[in-house]
Image (spheres, helix red, strand yellow):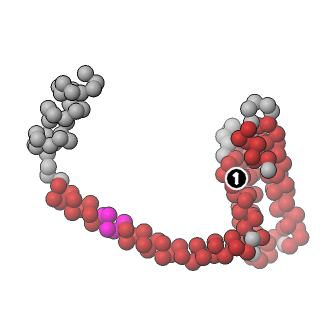
């Protein structure tokens, strides 16, 4: 809910409230990791569930954001906040189903993208083979030729609006 305050922060001190709430959530997220390691065990934490690895990655990015923000002044807080939303995915059966379907269709999407890239490459080769030898200015009657006196962008054209 505090993220919605970002749009109405008009110098009323709300930006500081948002930043402190963000830091509070990130500190809780970071401090939660050693407690989980202690409760489950370090090795079992990473081998039991893939979601534990995702949450560890989110905690690392939160720690990186804190370090970069307060040492170098560089901030990428929106990316970290949007990563925290992924923690909700494992609790929602519908979102988990959508993500699993997307994961299974990813190889097919990659293959389709490669076929499209190959088609674009073939058209580029054919276009350069047949149209690559056309010199600029060889066709003075072409309206797209900047040297054409009837071209409205030609500075010598009396109908040029920039004259």
Query: What residue range appears in magenta?
Result: 117-121
* Percent of width and height locating residue 84: 73, 58
* Percent of width and height locating residue 11: 75, 30
* Percent of width and height locating residue 67: 73, 45
SS for dot 1: helix
Q: Is residue 52 above or below residue 21?
A: below
Q: Say which quadrant the C terminus sits in.
A: top left
The image quarter containing residue 85 is: bottom right
Q: Nearer the viewer, residue 162 or 80?
A: 162
* Residue denoted by label 1: 80
* Percent of width and height locating residue 42: 81, 70
The secondary structure making up most of the magenta span is helix
Q: Report whether residue 50 is seen.
A: no
The image quarter containing residue 74 is: top right
Q: Is residue 17 left or right of residue 115?
A: right
Q: Is residue 50 above or below residue 152?
A: below
Q: Decide: few, some or many residues near mark 1? Use Cα within 10 Å; few <14, some 14-19, many ≥20.
A: many
Q: Nearer the viewer, residue 87 or 72?
A: 87
Q: Is residue 121 above or below residue 142?
A: below
Residue at the outermost top position: 163
Say if the magenta span includes residue 2: no
Q: Nearer the viewer, residue 69 or 2?
A: 2
Q: Report whether residue 115 is seen.
A: yes
Q: Is residue 147 left or right of residue 106?
A: left
Q: Nearer the viewer, residue 144 or 40?
A: 144
Q: Is residue 13 left or right of residue 137?
A: right
Residue drawn at 81 percent across, 56 percent down = 30
Residue drawn at 16 percent across, 59 percent down = 130
Q: Is residue 16 above or below residue 80?
A: above
């Amino acid at each position: 809910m505090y993220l919605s305050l970002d749009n109405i922060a008009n110098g009323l001190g709300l930006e500081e409230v948002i930043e402190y709430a963000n830091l509070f959530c990130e500190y809780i997220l970071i401090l939660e990791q050693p407690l989980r390691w202690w409760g489950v065990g370090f090795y079992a934490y990473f081998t039991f569930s893939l979601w534990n690895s995702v949450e560890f990655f989110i905690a690392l990015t939160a720690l990186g954001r804190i370090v970069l923000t307060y040492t170098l002044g560089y901030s990428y807080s929106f990316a970290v906040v949007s990563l925290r939303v992924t923690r909700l995915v494992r609790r929602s059966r519908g979102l988990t189903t959508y993500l699993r379907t997307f994961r299974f269709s990813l190889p097919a999407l990659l293959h389709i993208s490669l076929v499209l890239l190959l088609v674009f490459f073939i058209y580029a080769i054919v276009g350069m083979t047949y149209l690559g030898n056309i010199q600029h200015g060889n066709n003075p009657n072409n309206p797209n030729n900047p040297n054409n006196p009837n071209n409205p962008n030609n500075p010598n054209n009396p109908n040029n609006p920039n004259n």
